[in-house]
């Protein structure tokens, strides 16, 4: 009897509290797990709402946040919870792919539509006259540029599988041409169209320069007189066409004085003309200097005179005959005298050509 009482006391005061503590601890752990799962479920419900969003940024952020929330409860997730996470993530990724493909298609469609417009105009021969021959070459350049822009779209920026050539074929439909799959083939096809008008293009470019030079030589000219001017090899209508283009491109400008219009070079064109004039003048001076140099060297050689020519290194042409110096001065050459010489003459006094 006494043993039973002692056993009861030990159980009641020592063993039972330990059992209750352990049971309470496990219950607390289960409650914490349940709470963590509940918090994850609440977070995932909010994030999954991004499926209905049209914002790529929001969907990407939701995927990243969902992954982060899952890592916090991954250690307590059961099979059902793991499955829900995988399913939620899959739906978000599919939405992201749909949005990014739509974004890619919108950009691609814009390039393809403009590309096709130019291609069809070129193929149909819509630019075949002197008036719009420039547009023909611009259209070819633009067409190829759009083709390159289309294939330059960076697919790595999009979470979707796209095949540009297949997409182009399907998008073009009956307008598709095999040459559109290759840059070289496209270039060859368009060049065959453009080259037919190349002589006219060159004629027009030449007439632009003829008119500009004609105005530049006169400084200013009456518009009425200019439009009546017949340039050799060109019709009056062709000259008028080029005149309008020159005004539009701001190479020429019109100024109204009284009741009449006068035409002159624009400031931009005049600046170009001045630069070209200076460039030509420098060339003429260089050619003139070369002639002077060659003439003096020949004279020194004919006279058997000693000379030192350092012009090939940016230096001067030196000689030591006073008589020749006076002779050259008499012929109009500018001759200087270096009393202390130079490094090239090792300090010897010498005459030189200025």
Image (cartoon, grey):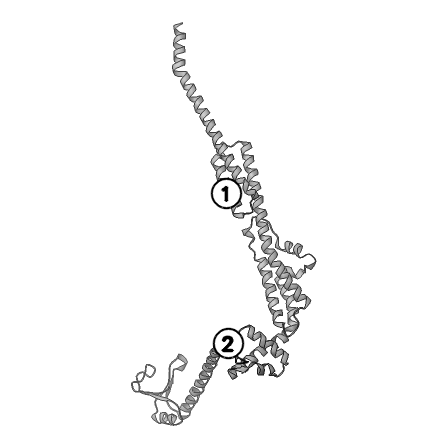
Q: What kind of element bears circle 2?
A: loop
Task: Answer with the quarter of the image where residue 230 lies.
Answer: bottom right
Residue under circle 2? Answer: 266
Label 1 Cα neighbours within 10 Å, binned few <14 / some 14-19 / many ≥20: some
Residue beneath the point at 41% across and 11% down: 8
103 left or right, relative to 297: right
Question: In x, y percent, where is residue 87?
Answer: 57, 38
Dot label at residue 64 = 1
Q: What kind of element bears circle 1?
A: helix
Q: Could one spot residue 185 in this view of the protein?
A: no
Residue beneath the point at 63% across and 81% down: 236
Q: Earlier in the sequence, mark 1 or mark 2?
A: 1
Q: Could one spot residue 95 in this view of the protein?
A: yes
Dot label at residue 145 = none
Nearest to the observer: residue 209 or residue 72: 209
Q: As displayed, is residue 205 above or below residue 46? A: below
Residue found at the far front of this picture: 258
Label 2 Cα neighbours within 10 Å, binned few <14 / some 14-19 / many ≥20: some
36 left or right, relative to 101: left
Q: As displayed, is residue 189 above or below residue 326? A: above
Question: In x, y percent, where is residue 241?
Answer: 61, 76
């Amino acid at each position: 009897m006494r043993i039973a009482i002692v056993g009861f006391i030990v159980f009641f005061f020592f063993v039972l509290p330990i059992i209750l503590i352990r049971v309470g601890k496990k219950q607390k752990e289960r409650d914490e797990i349940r709470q963590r799962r509940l918090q994850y479920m609440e977070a995932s419900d909010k994030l999954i709402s991004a499926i209905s969003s049209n914002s790529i940024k929001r969907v990407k952020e939701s995927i990243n946040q969902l992954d982060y929330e899952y890592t916090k409860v991954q250690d307590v997730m059961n099979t059902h919870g793991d499955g829900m996470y995988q399913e939620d993530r899959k739906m978000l990724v599919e939405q992201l792919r749909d949005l990014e493909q739509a974004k890619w298609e919108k950009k691609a469609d814009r390039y393809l539509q403009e590309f096709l417009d130019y291609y069809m105009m070129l193929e149909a021969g819509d630019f075949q006259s002197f008036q719009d021959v420039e547009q023909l070459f611009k259209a070819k350049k633009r067409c190829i540029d759009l083709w390159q822009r289309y294939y330059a779209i960076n697919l790595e920026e999009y979470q979707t599988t796209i095949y540009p050539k297949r997409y182009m074929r399907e998008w073009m439909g009956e307008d598709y041409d095999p040459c559109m799959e290759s840059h070289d083939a496209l270039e060859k096809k368009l060049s065959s169209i453009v080259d037919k008008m190349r002589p006219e293009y060159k004629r027009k470019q030449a007439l632009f320069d003829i008119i500009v030079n004609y105005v530049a030589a006169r400084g200013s000219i009456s518009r009425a007189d200019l439009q009546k001017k017949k340039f050799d090899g060109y019709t009056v209508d062709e000259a008028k066409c080029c005149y309008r283009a020159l005004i539009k491109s701001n190479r020429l400008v019109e100024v109204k004085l009284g009741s009449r219009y006068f035409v002159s070079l624009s400031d931009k064109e005049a600046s170009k003309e001045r630069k070209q004039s200076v460039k030509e003048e420098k060339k003429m001076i260089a050619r003139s200097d070369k002639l002077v140099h060659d003439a003096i060297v020949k004279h020194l050689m004919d006279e058997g005179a000693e000379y030192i020519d350092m012009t090939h290194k940016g230096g001067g042409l030196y000689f030591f005959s006073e008589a020749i110096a006076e002779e050259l001065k008499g012929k109009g050459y500018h001759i200087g005298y270096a009393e202390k010489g130079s490094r090239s003459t090792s300090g010897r006094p010498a005459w030189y050509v200025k």
